[in-house]
Structure formats: C-alpha cells, structure tokens
Amino acid sequence: MDQKYQRFDTHALGADGSPRCASCTMRASFGKGEAEYSRIVSKSSAALLNSLWEKKQIPEDGWPDHALELFLSWLACHDTNNRVDITTVGAGEREGRVVCSLVRKLHCNLSHGIGRSGNIGDIQPKALGSSMLACLANEFALHALQEIGVVTCKAALVVPLCTGMALSLCMGSWRKSRPMAKYVLWLRVDQKSCFKSILHAGYEPLIVDPIREGDALVTDVETVNRMLEQRGEEILCVLSTTSCFAPRSPDSLEAISGICQMHNVPHLVNNAYGLQSEECVRRLNAGRSTGRIDAFVQSLDKNFQVPVGGAVIGTFKQSAIVPIAQFYPGRASCVPSRDLVLTLLSQGRRGLMETYEKQKSVVMSTTSKTLIEGYEFMNFGSHSNEQHGGYLNIACGVGMSEGELDELFSRIATTYAKFSRQNGLFVPRSDSRVYVDSDD
C-alpha cells in the first residue's frame, strides 16, 4: 500500500485501530441491521413501482407526493437520454435535448413525447419511460371510466387535444370507411367547439334542432331517422351530445344508437363533461346496449381536475380505438397523460369515487343572432330558435364544494336584490342569506 493510502488508513482508524473522527465513527455505526433496513426500503420502493406497472390500474388508495416524484424519476430513467449506466449519444432526431433547465424540470425529464409519427399508440424506442407513461394513462382512463359507470367500455385513448379536436380526430379516422360521405348529422347543441369540430374535419353539418317537450328541448328522433333514410351514404356519422346546458336535455342515445345501427351509420357522442352526471352515464350504457356508439369523447380538465389540454376517447370495442390512434399525425405531448396519471395516483380509486359522489350539478340565453363560420343561430346558448322565458344557468364542475355553492347562492341573492332595487322590481325578503358586498 502506498504512503498516501497508508496515511488515510491511519487517520481513519488510528494507531490502535479505533475510529479517530466523527465521520468515521458514524460509518462504523452502520451495521447489519441498518444495511438490512436499507435493503428493505429499496426493495419495497421497487415493489411498489413494479406492482403498478404489472397491474396497470389505479391503486385503491392515493400515493403521497414523494412517491409520485419517485415514480416520475423511475419513468424518466427509462428514456435513453436519462440513462445513468451508459454514456448517452444523442444521434438521430429524437435526442431529448432541452436547453432550458426550468423547462426540463417542468417536464420531469420526460422530453420525447409519446407515440411515433404513424401512430400515437406505438412505443417510442428511445423513450421507453414516456411510452410506459402513455400506456398507464390509457389504462387508468379505462379503469376510471369503468369505475364511474361506463362498465362496458373496452378501450380508452388519452390525446393531447381539446374535446372539439378529439371529435375531429374521430371523424377524420372514419373518412376511408365512408368515402361518399360529405356531411355530419349534428344534433344542435350551442357549444361552438362541437360545431367547429365538424368543419375542422372537412365536413358540412346537417343541423337537426331539438323539439320542445314541456319545459325541455329533446332529440327530434323522427327527423334523424328520416335524414338517415334519405342521405345515409352521404352522412359520415351522427354527432350527439350528452352534457349540455338547460333547457336542452341530453340526447336520446338509446333511440339514436338504434337508428344508426339500422342504417349502418357511425355514432359519435360528445360527452364533454358527462362523466359527472349519472344520467349521462346511464344514457351511454343504454345507447351501447340498444345500438351502436362508435366512440365517445370527454374532457380531462372538466372530469378529472387537471389543466386544460387533454381528452379521453372511449370505445365499446377494443378494435375501434385502433384507427383513431393511427390517424393521429406525428408524436404527441405527454403532458396531459402525465397529469392524468399523477392525479389518479394521488387520489387513488377511493379518492376519485369520493369526488364524484360529492359532485353536485348546478349560459344565459339571448335573442341576438350568433354567426359561426357562416352559419347563423338565433338564441345561441339555449339550443333552439324558439323564444322562451328568462332563466339562469350556471355550470359548476366536479370538485366544487358545498361552501362554494353556499357562497354562490348568497351572491346571486344579494346581486339580484340590488338589481331589483335599481330597476324598481319587487324583492322578496324570505331568503336570509346575504352577501356583504355584492359589488365584489
């Protein structure tokens, strides 16, 4: 042993072989018990991650934040640019280079995206971790849909698109199977993104207004059937809607699905925030059992409390999701997939269902004309050209608390009272709830 190492050993152990400094004393204190404990911790962490990957289901109980961070680091280590056991060579077009360290941190070192240029569902060879994340997102989405109540759903695809763009993706994927189609039969709902999705896909809308039934607007089933009989080959699909604002009711998916099956026309359902409604979920299941629903689309942010930017496409056949995934051009951002997986891991199945059990559902109409891409609508927002009495409609998404609702109702009462006084209207005094400052 050379002199340098001999001096180090002498310093560490001393002349009599005992430790001579605090660091050496601490090192010597680590024995078999501590080593075994460390081994158990490492093994349990690996077991947690491996179990998640094997089951590919939302865990029953939520994970703490430090476990989520461990999970992200574990995934990132699978991408070639993050490997610690080899020298990475960034050759080719998918190097995973990110020049800004803050951007790299925001994306948790997952920079490759998901899918390949020809299919968003394909594994990216240089980004196994990102591909694993995309796989978990799809499996978690399917698990969540089934737990929420769409029990016969067989496949789910998370896409980094808004609801309208996801609807367009579905329509575009059916183009080859219906080469004569020029139109989409649209059951009017006054949401611009749904309407524009038809135009974006390159089709013309055939608009079917709802009909009045009591105080509600319901699906004009007879007109849908007649138009499919007359122009079936020219129609790409029927685009129906579940989630919408009053006075429009969710479409009668049972009747529409049966008609679509009879005429062999695809049926696409805009279920933007319908997962929050037991009635919308019931209609989805009923439509599946009585006829055909080729795909149904829901927003990630509205239903799962994540940032805007993603949607889930669900199908009742595993094979039906394949052409939709294959139609997506290029790779995709993994951010919506990441946010969904982290949120569901944080909540756990139990937390997700508790959120939905607490959910309580609570735009204003106008007689002015609204022009959308050359199409004119009267009373846009009330789903019909018919005149009606005034009403107030407020959207309150999943996650809203009872306290927020109480505060909302208090502000409405106080603001309406102030409006009534200013306009000489009668103000009932029966409601004791008063918001202190209605100008806020």
Image: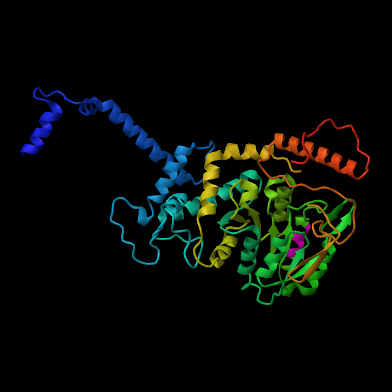
Q: Residue at x 89, y 32 (%)?
A: 430
Residue 115 lies, with reference to residue 76, above or below; the image says below
In the foreground, 109 or 254: 109
In the foreground, 247 or 376: 376
- Give the residues drawn in magenta, as a range: 255-261
Q: Is residue 205 magenta?
A: no
The image quadrant where one finds the N terminus is: top left
In the foreground, 185 or 226: 185
- Residue 151 seen in this snapshot: no
Which picture quadrant has residue 313? bottom right
Q: Residue at x 94, y 40 (%)?
A: 426
In the foreground, 369 or 427: 427
Q: Residue at x 60, y 54 (%)?
A: 312
- Residue 207 seen in this snapshot: yes
Q: Where does the image place residue 184, in percent across and percent down from the top left?
A: 72, 69
Q: Where does the image place residue 404, in percent across and percent down from the top left?
A: 71, 37
Residue 405 lies, with reference to residue 75, above or below; the image says above
Q: Where does the image place residue 440, in percent across and percent down from the top left?
A: 74, 41
Q: Main secondary structure of the magenta part?
A: helix
Q: Residue at x 53, y 68 (%)?
A: 329
Q: Is residue 259 magenta?
A: yes
**In the image, farthest residue toward the left:** 2
